Amino acid sequence: MKTKTLCKLVIDLVMTVLMLVLMACRLTGNTIHELLGVSLFILFIVHNILNWGWYKTLLKGRYNTLRVLHTAVNILLLAAMLVLMISSVMFSRTVFAFMDLNGGLFARKLHMLSTYWGFILISMHLGMHWGVIMDTARKLANIIAPNRNRTFTLRIIAVLIAVYGVYASFNRDVGSKLILYYTYDFWNFDQSAAIFFLDYLSIMGLFVCLTYYTVRLIQQRS
């Protein structure tokens, strides 16, 4: 495997983990939350530099259904991350507090909206590249021959994750947060951190599955 490809996958994995941890800001505290946020944005910039060739092809070639979907997800993710970064700076209380921008409620609303859209779009981005991720995992595990039982088991696990992800999406009011129905994301201090991460991992798994199988369907019809 090429070093650059492995580096991209590692960066994507670390960014995904950071995004999940950043969703639990009440667990980490504000200072750690902001430091992890800065780390995420640094990795996001590195990710875009490593994939700069993709931007140079945007105005080249024909656009079929799959390419339109891929481009739309990437552009929307870029926009969400930029808004997330700007809103973070606007009401920072630690890392960028010296700028004294005082974004107030407007910045908080932008931050919450871009956080949840960024989370969903990162999940879709992973789903669009899930085939490559699985191929890489098989190579690293030295799995060469196909195995029907293994494939069947993995698909059952994916279905269970997706089903629980639907439940968690409603339980966490993700849809309402995507349209900014709620201005604040209230933390339930009675819940365990394990349940929180299980819920959001399942929601991520749901959108990974939906995107991956949508891509597969488009490819088959093409």
Image (cartoon, rainbow, N blue to C red):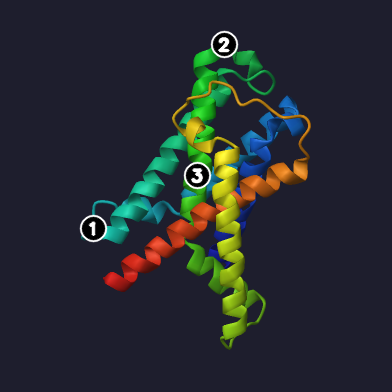
Pointer 2 local density, CA inside 10 Å: few below 14, some 14–19, many at least 20: some
Residue 53 position within the rendered picture, expressed as x and y whole percent measured from the top left: 38, 56
Which residue is labeled 1 in the image?
63
Q: For mark 3, what is the residue?
A: 120
Q: CA distance from mark 3 to mark 1?
A: 24 Å
Kindly indicate whether the residue at mark 2 contacts the one at mark 3 (C-beta within 8 angstroms): no
Residue at point 53% right, 54% down?
Answer: 206
Give the mark nearer the N terminus: 1 vs 2.
1
Q: Quadrant of residue 4?
A: bottom right
> Is 201 in front, or is 130?
201
Residue at x 44%, y 30% (from the top left corner): 179
Tell me whether the residue at label 1 lies in contact with that at label 2, contact meaning CB atoms closer than 8 angstroms.
no
Q: Is residue 152 left or right of residue 127?
A: right
Q: Is disc 3 surrounded by few (<14), some (14 to 19) or many (20+) residues within 10 Å? A: many
Residue carrying label 2: 102
Amino acid under disc 2: Asn
Q: Is 194 situated above or below 88?
A: below
Q: Residue type at mark 3: give it.
A: Ile
Q: Where in the figure is residue 21, as x and y percent of width and height?
A: 68, 41
Residue at image coords 50%, 68%:
132
Rendering coords of residue 28 (x, y %): 75, 33
Q: What is the three-letter code of the residue carrying label 1? A: Tyr
Quadrant location of residue 115?
A: top right
Regarding mark 2 in the picture, which secondary structure is present there? loop
Visible residue check, residue 143: yes
**Between discs 3 and 2, the one toward the N terminus:** 2
The numbered mark, 3 or 1, whose residue comes first in the sequence reads 1
Q: Nearer the viewer, mark 3 or mark 1?
A: 3
